[in-house]
Amino acid sequence: MSATETAHEGACCAAGATTRRGGAPAEVVLVSPYEIGRQPFALAHAAAWLREAGLKVDCVDLAVERLDPARLAGARLVALHLAMHTATRLAAAALPLIREAAPKAHLCAFGLYAPVNADYLRGLGVGTILGGECEPDLLALAQACCGGGPAEAAAAAAKPRVRLERVAFRVPARDALPPLGRYARLLLPDGGERVVGFAETTRGCKHLCRHCPVVPVYRGRFWAIPVETVLADVAQQVEAGAEHVSFGDPDFLNGPTHALRVARALHARFPHLTWDCTIKIEHLLRHRALLPELRALGCLFVISAVEAVDDAILARLDKGHTAADLERAVALTRGAGLALAPTFVPFTPWTTLEGYLELLRRLVALRLVEAVAPVQLAIRLLVPAGSRLLELEDLRPHLGPFDPALLGHPWRHPDPAVDALQRRVQAWAAEAERRGLPRRESFAGIWRLAHEAAGRTPPPLPEDLGEPVPRLSEPWYCCAEPTEDQLAGL
Ligand code: SF4
């Protein structure tokens, strides 16, 4: 039993119990299908809310543990957290097993991908859909399912909603989840590894990037989690062994004053703790003066959703930056001693074979090859229900009607060679990951595939493709299709 589980045992009597294996059967089971290798904040936060109300809660994280029917058998409510595309895909595969194991349980889905896929999820037996700041609604549903009669449960279930009012943030019940050692680790360029904790300082986002799944739910709003709550969450994870914290905020600098308060307080209390976060290119440029301080406060690397290096595509996505801005951001972050880890959506209906080659050439020229996970070079644009992409007139000719099974609108590239390249790059990225190839070797394979698709002989790659950067050991991505291994885990 981990230290956190031991600590939790003492807390069970006062309020509700958060049960893990071997405890009393839970009446509410919270399930996370996938969170990019992170110990899920949303599950631990919801567990804290329910436990405080005296409910017996179990948390199952399918990313690191198998679905055990015994843990579901007594459940009155099973709620799945759908934070991203991959998680929703995995949830669809898990739902028949959950229904079989918990035939009396009411099923709920919450998180970013629940409201936009409501019809599909209802078809899979999900009775309640919640989105946004949904903990109060989840609590009301759980109380109705566990304490009330069928009429109360039905009334609570009939109120699906996307709540956009501030909730009172609790310190997440981390002890409800598997220990941090089972999640992604920090891999350092010198071969060292660190145990990683996962926290959030804000929820939502103030931007309206056209392709982003946060936008249809939060519509430009975000909420800061109080500094003391963030600190208490990090403190319990440090006690559980965390040596590095990965902040999962959609954008760490949505509220720069709040971000600095958190970072300063964190560093003052845990001077040896390192951390990473996600910051958009626009914010890296606007808040360039803060970057050296973020580094001094322990930030090791910054993930940034670059998406493309074609200005026309960036304008369609409403990203708020240009290809030239990426070059400035690379220089600024390097100058501050921060590693930049860009993410991409390289395959869109406007991508050309030449444009894809230009992306690869840009990564070589900027010496970013070691900073990009191979799967990033295979991502295909997703068009979920309610996406602002649907506003684009020049997307419509490529788009089919919403297909619930795809969790979005299917689209076909006007040049079949681009779609064929995407499939080949995705298959190669999965194969390279399975074989544990170094990033430069994976990139060389993509370089070859892209040149072959364009009918060119690949030129030799330079020796210097950039320095390896600190990164997390989880290589997969929120918008990628689940791998066979992920599905087999169910
Ligand atoms: S892509 Fe990033 S910055 Fe843009 S809306 Fe989404 S979370 Fe916000």
Image (cartoon, rainbow, N blue to C red):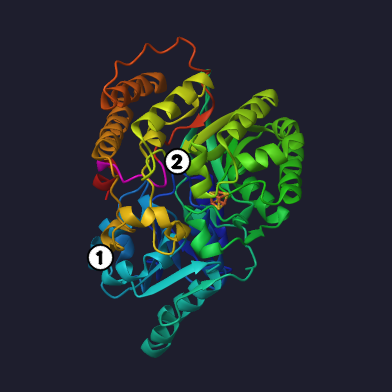
Residue sitting at 51 percent across and 30 percent down?
471
Residue 64 lies in quadrant: top left
Depth check: give the residue in front, 185 or 424. 424
Depth check: give the residue in front, 392 or 194. 392
Depth check: give the residue in front, 109 or 98. 109
Whether residue 219 is visible here, answered yes or no, is yes
- Asked whether mark 2 and ligand 1 are closer than 8 Å, the reply comes as no
Earlier-in-chain disc, 2 versus 1? 1
The residue that mark 2 highlights is: 183
- Residue 46, given in percent of the width and then of the height, sits at 52, 63
> In the image, is residue 483 part of the stretch drawn in magenta?
yes
Q: Which portion, as a residue range, is magenta?
A: 477-484
Amino acid marked by disc 1: Ala
> In the image, is residue 85 part of the stretch drawn in magenta?
no
SS category of the residue bearing label 2: loop
Residue sitting at 67 percent across and 57 percent down?
224
In this rendering, the count of numbered labels is 2
The numbered mark at residue 101 is 1
- Asked whether, in this view, residue 157 is left or right of residue 431, the answer is right
Whether residue 369 is visible here, answered yes or no, is no
Amino acid marked by disc 2: Tyr
The numbered mark at residue 484 is none
- Residue 240, given in percent of the width and then of the height, sits at 56, 43
